[in-house]
Image (tube, rainbow, N blue to C red):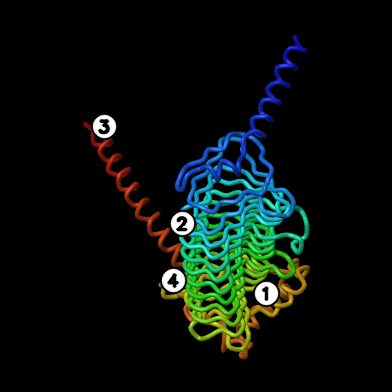
Amino acid sequence: MKKLVSIVCFWLLMMGTTYASEFDVQGEIDATEEGGVLIIPPGHYKGNFTITKSIVIKGEEGVKLVALGKEPALRIEQANNVVIENLAFTAKEKAIVASDVEGMKLRQLTIENVHTGIHIQRAKNLSLQRLSVTGNDEHYSKKGNGIAIFKSKDVIVADSKIRKVQDGIYIEEVERIAVHNNSVNNSRYGTHFMYTSDADVQNNVYLHNVTGLMIMMTEHLQASKNKLANHQNLNGYGMLLYDVEHMSLQNNTIVNNRVGIALQKSEIILIKHNDFQMNQTAIEGTKLDSETLVTANQFTGNILTARSDRDGFRLESNYYDNYFGVDVEGDGIGDIPYVAFSSFGQWMVRQPVYQYFIESPSVTLLTTLDTQINKTEQTVLVDDKPRVTMQQNVEKASDIYITQLLVGLLVSISGLWLWRRGMK
C-alpha cells in the first residue's frame, strides 16, 4: 500500500512538473491577440519574458516566474493597458522592469529574494496595488529598491507590503502620485521622494527603518494619517524634509524616533494635528521661512520638544506635557507662554544615559530656570497660546457632572415616588 501511494505521489509530481515545463510562457504571450487575456497554469517558469503589447496576464494559484541570469523576470516595453495579476516572482537583480507604458496595472503580486522588486520609468496612469516585496538580508548598500518609479505621471501605489530593501518606494521626477495604505519596514527609507510634485501620502505605516519618509526637492505634498515609529538609528528620522515647498503634515502619529520630524531648508510647511510621542527630539528645524507653522499638535513623552537655528519656526496652540503654566480663565489656553527650550534635554539627546535623571530635583530646577532666565531662546520656539489639559478635563468633567445630575435627579424622583406609595 505504501509503495502504491509513493508511486501515485511521484506520478502526480512528474505530471505537475511536465505541465509547467510544457507551457511556453513567452510563446503564449506572443500568440495572445492584442488586448487579449492569458491565464498561466500553476508551475514555476524559468526565463526572461517580454511584453510589447496590450495584454492581461493572470496566474492561477502557484504560478512563479523565475529570472535567468541578471536579466529581469518580466520586461514590459512600449505597451498600453497591460495588466499583470496574481503572479509570484524571484530574480537575482530586478523582478519587473517597465518602460514607456501607459495604463499599466500590477495587482496582487508577490516578489521575494530580489535585489530590486519593480523598476518603472516613463509611465502614465500607473496603478500598483496589493503587492508584497521582500528583499534580502544584505547591507543597504547592496540592496535595490522595493518599488522605483522615475519620470512618470498619475501614479497610485496602494495596499502593499515591503520589507528588507534599500528604499521601500522610491519616487523621482513624478507628477501626481498617491501613496496610500502601504507598510514598509526594516529598510533604509520607507518612501523616498526626489524632484516630485503633487503627492498624497496617506494611511501608511513605517516601522524600524533608518528613516520613515525622506522628502527632498519636492513641492506640494500632503502627508496625513501615517504612522512613523521606531527609527532610532544614529541618523534616524521619522520624517526628513530637505528643500521642500508647500507641504502639509496632518493627523500623523510619530512615535519613538531619534528625531520625529526634521525640517531643513524648506518653505511654507504646515504641521498640524499630529501626535508626537516618546521621540528623543520631536521637531528639529534649520533654515526655515517664517511661514512654517506648527499648530494644534500634541507633544507627550518627548525628551526635547523642539530645537532650531536662530530663525526657528512658529509654534501656535500646541499641547505640551512639560508645560507648567496655569489656566486661570479656564479657556484651555495657558496664561504664560511655553518656551521650547531645555538645557537638560539638549544634553540628553546627545547622551541618552542622562534620561535616568529625568524628574530629579536638580533637573526640575534647571527646567524652571530655563523658562525664566533664558532670554536668547525666548525669541524663537515660543508658543504664546499653549493648550493645557484643563480644557479637556473641563469638557469631560462637565459631561460627567451633567450625567451625574440627571441620574441623581432620576433616583431622587423615583425614591420620592416609592416613599409616597409606601405611605399610602
Quarter-of-image position of residue 311 = bottom right
Q: Is residue 68 above or below residue 294?
A: above
Badge 4 or badge 3: first in the primary sequence: 4
Tag 2: residue type?
Gly
Disc 3 secondary structure class: helix
Q: Residue furthest top?
A: 1
Q: Which circle, 4 or 3, is nearer the viewer? A: 4
Spatial CA span between label 1 and label 3 = 63 Å
Tag 3: residue type?
Gly
Residue at mark 1: 364
Spatial CA span between label 4 and label 3 = 50 Å
Quarter-of-image position of residue 208 = bottom right
Q: Of the numbered discs in the image, which one, if any, rests on residue 103?
A: 2
Spatial CA span between label 2 and label 4 = 52 Å
Disc 1 secondary structure class: helix
Say which of 270 and 15 sits in front. Answer: 15
Q: Which circle, 1 or 4, is nearer the viewer? A: 4
Residue at mark 3: 422
Spatial CA span between label 1 and label 4 = 24 Å
Spatial CA span between label 2 and label 3 = 81 Å
Tell me the residue at 57%/64% (across/down).
121
Q: Position of residue 31 (x, y in %)?
A: 53, 42
Quadrant position of the C terminus in the picture: top left
Badge 2 or badge 1: first in the primary sequence: 2
Badge 1 or badge 4: first in the primary sequence: 4
